[in-house]
Image (tube, grey):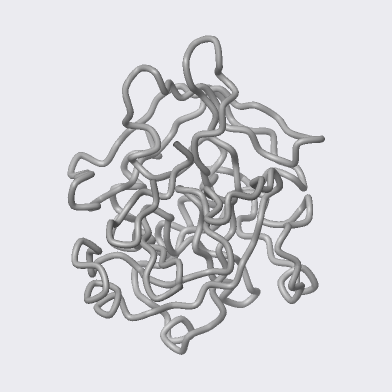
């Protein structure tokens, strides 16, 4: 459960890298639409953020239970939080669903690779890669996001708009959770300040808050470059509640680019 004093998971119960990614999928990544980008709607349009998927699984007789958000990075690989896929056998990962509920498609899971240095107690290296049994069929509703460059560009350092794209997490006010994919502006906070508020919050995580709580695995993104494209900056992994604000921590993707590439190019 979410706690005012405890850091918890957000679950329900490179130019080189970019070049390799583009070649591997045969599909442009990070599609950007100016009108959608400027819209204040919290519910994403069907073609908006088409890299957001629902990771489903559960017991053998309940394989369609929503577990976490997954983010498509190429034609066969999805990144998510390690704590989403490293549970016991009662929470088997079955597949990843892309698209809206009325136009979704299920992609079965072939293998799951958890970061070897993942530490659930310290909220460190909370990252995993899901390999699908076959390549996804790209469409307006299913496309990959771009991976960032290894170096932080000047534009990002100047605090460009950050967007969280994914699914809604457990609601603090106990209302029924939205089933549609969502998008929200992310207000970034100095991670050191978050660590002061919550000692167990690692300074290595990106810290900030949004209007609604995202589900674990949701993407922290930025639209940058010429032409503009969405890049994956972080993955939602943890959060805590303090001073009437719902703080969320995102694993920083950049330090893990080499590991992602190594484990998604097999």
Compared to residue 112, the image places residue 191 above or below, namely below
Compared to residue 165, the image places residue 52 above or below, namely above
Viewer-closest of 32 and 15? 32
Viewer-closest of 174 and 129? 174
Q: Residue at x 38, y 79 (%)?
A: 189
- Horizontal and vertical percent for residue 245? 45, 72
Q: Residue at x 22, y 64 (%)?
A: 202
Pick the quarter of the image with the C terminus: top left
Compared to residue 144, the image places residue 59 above or below, namely above
Do we see residue 253 in this rendering?
A: no
Q: Is residue 218 left or right of residue 194?
A: right
Q: Residue furthest top?
A: 61
Viewer-closest of 124 and 16? 124
- Horizontal and vertical percent for residue 136? 63, 33
Pick the quarter of the image with the N terminus: top left
Do we see residue 129 in this rendering?
A: yes
Q: Is residue 201 left or right of residue 39?
A: left
Q: Residue at x 37, y 29 (%)?
A: 112
- Horizontal and vertical percent for residue 51? 61, 49
């Amino acid at each position: 459960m979410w706690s005012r004093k405890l850091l918890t998971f957000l679950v329900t119960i490179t130019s080189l890298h970019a070049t390799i990614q583009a070649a591997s999928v045969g599909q442009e990544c990070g599609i950007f639409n100016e009108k959608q980008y400027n819209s204040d709607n919290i519910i994403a349009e069907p073609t908006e953020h088409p890299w957001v998927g629902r990771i489903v699984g559960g017991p053998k007789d309940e394989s369609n239970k929503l577990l976490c958000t997954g983010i498509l990075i190429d034609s066969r690989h999805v990144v998510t939080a390690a704590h989403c896929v490293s549970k016991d056998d009662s929470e088997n990962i079955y597949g990843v669903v892309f698209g809206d509920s009325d136009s979704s498609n299920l992609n079965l899971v072939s293998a799951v690779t958890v970061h070897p240095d993942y530490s659930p107690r310290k909220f460190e290296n909370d990252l995993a890669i899901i390999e699908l049994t076959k390549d996804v069929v790209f469409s307006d509703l299913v496309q990959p996001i771009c991976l960032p460059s290894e170096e932080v560009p000047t534009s990002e350092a100047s605090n460009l708009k950050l967007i969280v794209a994914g699914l809604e997490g457990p609601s603090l006010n106990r209302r029924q959770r939205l089933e549609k994919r969502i998008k929200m502006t992310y207000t970034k906070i100095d991670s050191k300040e978050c660590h002061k508020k919550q000692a167990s919050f690692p300074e290595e995580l990106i810290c900030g808050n949004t209007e609604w709580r995202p589900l674990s695995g949701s993407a922290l993104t930025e639209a940058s470059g010429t032409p503009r494209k969405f890049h994956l900056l972080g993955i939602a992994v943890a959060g805590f509640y303090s001073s009437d604000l719902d703080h969320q921590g995102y694993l920083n993707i950049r330090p893990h680019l080499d590991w992602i590439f190594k484990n998604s190019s097999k």
